[in-house]
Image: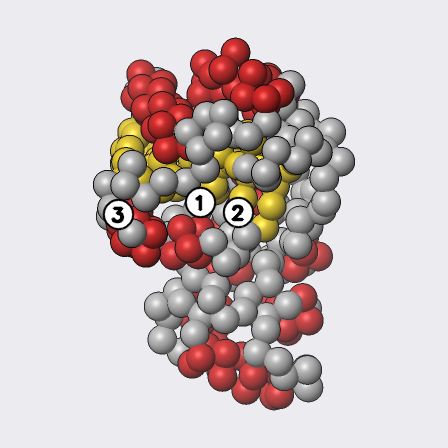
Amino acid sequence: MAYNTVVISSGHSINCQGMSDIINEVTEARRVVDRVYDIVKASGKTCYKYHDMASSSSQNLANIVNFHNSHSQGVDVSIHFNACNHTSKARGVEVCYYSQFMLADEMSRNISKVTGLINRGPKERTGLYVLKHTTKPSILIEVCFGDSEADCAIYKAKFEDICQTIAKTLIGGITVPSNSTNSSPTHSAPTNSTTTTSKPSGDSWVRRLQEECDKQGFSNQKVDGIPGPNTLRGCPLLKIGARGNITKLLQEKLGITADGIFGNNTKSAVIKYQKSKGLSADGIVGQNTWRKLLGL
């Protein structure tokens, strides 16, 4: 996947420090952001960067989210460094995600491949404030462990490779074959390999759902407006707290206000729909509920 616009920020702030050990998280995150910004801009793509100055954690998080949401297009990226009290087993790169498993997996694999950092893989973190409250596809990269001498040595030696890889994974130009042994995503991606941009066909709502699931990394399926097994497998679990275009499509299908935010009103509508279809009425849109919504 490739984006024409990258919106990137460093974690924490100089007045609200994160991890500081062998390396300082704020200092190094800013270095990575600045270099990735330069690489993306040099490619001709659009890039926006942000370093916050807030002195409280709550204001820092709010400022970062506001910055990202002020740009409506592209992908959101937050740069961080990990720490685990000098535990020797805690090493490597990992990429946290809210719904972008495929992008997180690709990013973690690519950084590991070019640097030799252990690939800790994609980590679903729906409770992280930045991932939860940004409105575009988003990932949070934990570049390495800042309290690991081995990781920091690799980071310092491979700084440019790391920045080039982050940029090129986002805008296109690098792909590392998957050999990840990390845990599977919450939502498995269909293997239908053809994505088409041919003349629209089939059901309009289904077609828009297929397009959005492909765009957000849940699937790589044929966009034909015809619901089938691949369409069903590409539909993510939706529940309280979910937000975005897939939630908006769900709300549209349920006939309620489509604001893209899965709140109590959406949960109530889902429960009502589930009851009408003889499903377990838990207010969570899983595979059984999607199957009914798709008419399968």
The residue tagged 3 is: 55
**Three-letter code, disc 1:** Ser
Query: Which of 249 and 44 lies nearest the eye of the viewer?
Result: 44
Image coordinates for residue 114, horizontal then vertical, percent: 59, 17
Vertical placement of residue 69 versus 278, above or below:
above
The numbered dot on residue 97 is 2
Number of on-image labels:
3
| Nearest-to-viewer mark from 3 and 2 | 3
First reached walking from the N terminus: tag 1 or tag 3? 3
Query: Which of 9 and 27 lies nearest the eye of the viewer?
Result: 27
Mark 1 crowd level (few <14, some 14–19, many ≥20, 10 Å Cα)? many
- Per the image, label 2 sits on a secondary structure element best described as strand
Give the Cα distance between marks 1 and 3.
24 Å
Determine contact: label 1, label 2, CB under 8 Å.
Answer: yes
The numbered dot on residue 138 is 1
Residue appearing at x 49%, y 15% in the figure? 156
**Three-letter code, disc 3:** Ser
Image coordinates for residue 137, horizontal then vertical, percent: 44, 46
Give the Cα distance between marks 3 and 2.
26 Å
Give the Cα distance between marks 1 and 2.
7 Å
